[in-house]
Image (cartoon, helix red, strand yellow):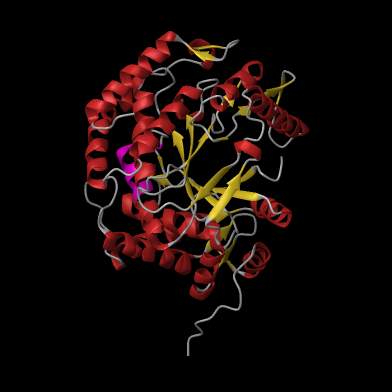
Amino acid sequence: MTQMTAKRYVDIYEAYDRFYEGERVREDQWDYSIVPTNAALMKEKYDISFGPDIIPTDEDLCERLFLAGVDMLLTTGFYNTDLGRVLHITEEELFEGLKMAPKKLSLGSGKDRVKCKARRGNARRKPVIQGGPTGAPVSEDIFVPMIKSYAQEPVVDTIVSGVLNTVNNHPATTNTPWEIRATMAEIRYVREACLMSQRPGMCI
Amino acid sequence: MKPFDAHECSQLNEMKMDMSGLNMLAGWGASGDVIMMEQMPIFGGYIGDIEETTICDVATMIASFVIFDCDIHLDGPIHIRWGTTTTRETLKIAAHAAAALDLNTDFLLANQYYTLAGPCTEMCLLETAAQAITDTASGRELLSGVASSKGVSQDKTTGMEARMMGEAALATCGMEIQEVNRVLDRILELYENNFGKAPQGKRFQDCYNVKEVEPSEEYIDLYDDTIKTLLRCGIEL
């Protein structure tokens, strides 16, 4: 008889162990064969076909799409590029894991704190607005004013940073100590921009 | 970083992860930090068509919560040819994936913004508005942007694009979905044929007074004109 109850949800440590003990697969096989083949199978199995609408109005289609995504994850698993191995979880573990997902979060502090709560469909409550360059490259000399241009917008609730490509005029080369220095500078600069906008508790 | 901030970690395309990411997640998880997990499925790559890409997107979002213990998933379906999240196809992928998960879970879902046009152009603001309308109406909880000029051009991002993202979201809340779809069709018709000749826009230094941190008169006028354009499309900011 199939067991219906998971012993517990899969945490990050269990995920590593499963990757480590998982089936060995070549990355090109994963990319060019396993993932696209399974995605095509799920499309057919769950009869997934989109109409002209950007936002779906067919609840049955949304239900089938969710089941297709669940099946895709259970059937395919997840690939670890460093280990070259595949993790699998069971259906019971997946649904146990769904219960662990937070329904609300608190971002920021003091009067700048915002709540991020699950919305339902096109609810009247607005989503949290996270403003910022979203990882785009920003020059060191304008970093603070650029971030301030977001922090001072009343509609913006939290900040997403840009990327300094120099720090103290030195290239912030990846995988070098200069990358760490640049990251620390970004955090200081973003905090300064929030302070200058009278919003010191903004989540960054 | 402080306990009330958020930490971001990215999956790899498609349905992949590396040890560096796992180790970061373990550290943040042990510290009780808020974890935002990113994954931007590529439309037009080896996954297949719109539907296959969306199925993959749903699977990766579920994985973020049930395997990697994240608190909020940051999506961003991206077009392989244009490198943007604002095409008709990528908006459709984002909307369908969000709606499917919204119906079946309480996941906190975010989406990020990569426009093709640069700051201080109507196309950039229209691309931003179209995505904000899509994300809001399909039930997302957080909108993150805007990486104008595809997020690759030095200094080509400004607060005005985030203003448009937020104001378009506010204007969309509570609208009936069929009406939202009609509005989206009208906005997309205004820019989707211009991807081959999208305006590069201006750098922050060229459309803001850097000292005062104020947008230029030109950008304010353009923003006002875009609001009028959006009103003609059926949405009032």
Q: Determine whether, in the image, residue A9 is placed left or right of residue B89.
A: right
Q: Determine whether, in the image, residue B121 is placed left or right of residue A56.
A: right
Q: Can residue B86 be seen in this view?
A: no
* B33 over B164 or under it: above or below: below
Q: Quadrant of the N terminus of chain B?
A: top right
Q: Quadrant of the C terminus of chain B?
A: top left
What residue is rendered at 38% in x and 43% in y? B136
Q: Does the magenta stretch include residue B88?
A: yes
Foreground pick, A199 / A97: A199
Query: What segment carries the magenta color?
Result: B85-95
Foreground pick, A107 / B53: A107
What residue is rendered at 59% in x and 25% in y? A147
The image quadrant of residue A24 is: bottom right
What residue is rendered at 65% in x and 28% in y? A190
Farthest-out residue, bottom: A1
The overriding secondary structure of the stretch rendered in magenta is: helix
Q: Determine whether, in the image, residue B86 is placed left or right of residue A174.
A: left
Residue B86 coordinates in the image, percent (x, y) = 37, 35
Residue A152 coordinates in the image, percent (x, y) = 55, 24
Q: Does the magenta stretch include residue A26?
A: no
Residue A53 coordinates in the image, percent (x, y) = 24, 46
Q: Can residue B82 be seen in this view?
A: yes
Farthest-out residue, front: A111
What residue is rendered at 66% in x and 68% in y? A14
Residue A44 coordinates in the image, percent (x, y) = 29, 64
* A148 over B63 or under it: above or below: above
